[in-house]
Image: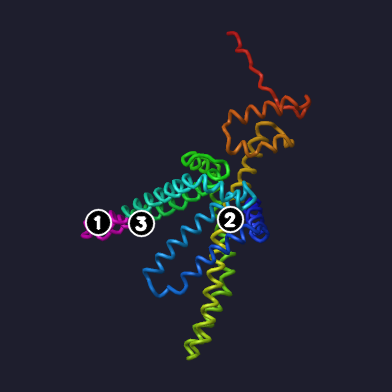
Amino acid sequence: MGIMYDSIRDTVKYVLTSKSFLMLALVLFVVSVLGIPFQSIMVVYVIHLLLFSIAGALLGGIIVCLFKEPELDGAVSRFSRLLGKFILLNIAEILISVFLLVSMAGFLILAVVVVHIVKSSPSLALAVGIFFAVLAVFGFGSLIYVSLRLSLALPFLLLEEAGVIDSLKKSWELSRGKVITIFATSFLFGILYSLLLIPAFIVQGAGFVLMALKNALAGRVIELAGAVLLSFLTSFYILASYVLTVMLFKNISKSVGIAALETVVGQKDEPSRKLFVMAAIKPAKAVRKQLKAVKAKRPAGKAAVRKTVKRKPKAR
């Protein structure tokens, strides 16, 4: 609960106080609004949705970089330098998702084929159908699970400048035992976003009612106002989700790092707390070297770290 509450609280505070975030959200909102007149033209609207998704990903990457370079110019420069890795990371995550989806689809197709073969025996066909349905559900669950485990790769890539494969590996390690926390936090954040959409849907609904009552002009204006409000809230939420990812990354790193250091060092001293990020993202060898330096400066006594005593084997 602590990580979930802190992450959502920090996200809300950041998006409401950061001028750079609001500026980038306004840019994405403009891109979104440009597609409203073309909603009735399917091909153009699909192309716009694709461009909107790309714009959201790029602006989201810049927002992540803001946590390393607070100034917008510095964040843009950093993101431009890491753009190649950013694209490769997104491709890798898409390929992983496609592989899991294809595997799940393969199970479903195989289930249809097998059921068709054994259709002469209804009980056997039912058993086979249930078996493959369970496999399909397991495959869908695996897709969600893997997505959650890899959801922290982007901060490693853009904030710590880790490689693509290394970012995926570190995300997998950092999210160990935190999948439910990540899922619950994202789910709750999505519910908050859904609540914010209610006014936009009410405005759009009022516009449709007026058009149905033969008041086309007023209905169209009100419906358009609802669409604009919906575009703004959607743009805001997409970029806020990147902020939430960084906050989860920071809070999980903090909790994992402090827990690891308290286990090794033996107490909650300030020098150890400053090393919590290292415990989460740096090699164990480097962390051990820093821990030795901390222990060397600590006075002897009850608070000192217990040293392992090697016992001599008893003579037979």
The main secondary structure of the magenta stretch is: helix
Residue depicted at x 58% and y 35%: 282
Q: Say if 153 sits above or below 189 in the image.
A: above
Q: Point out the stretch of residues depicted in magenta.
A: 108-130
**Magenta stretch holds residue 155:** no
- Distance CA(mark 3)–CA(mark 2): 29 Å
Report, in whole angstroms, how far the alpha carbon at label 1 lies from the one at label 2. 40 Å
Give the image location of residue 90, x and y in percent: 45, 49
The residue at which mark 3 appears reads as: 133
Q: Which residue is mark 2?
A: 185
**Visible residue check, residue 227:** yes
How busy is the neighbourhood of tag 3: few (under 14 within 10 Å), some, or many (20 plus)?
A: some
**Residue 208 relative to residue 1: left or right:** left
Q: Quadrant of residue 304?
A: top right
Front one among 50 and 206 = 50
Neighbour class for label 2 at 10 Å: few (<14), some, many (≥20)?
A: many
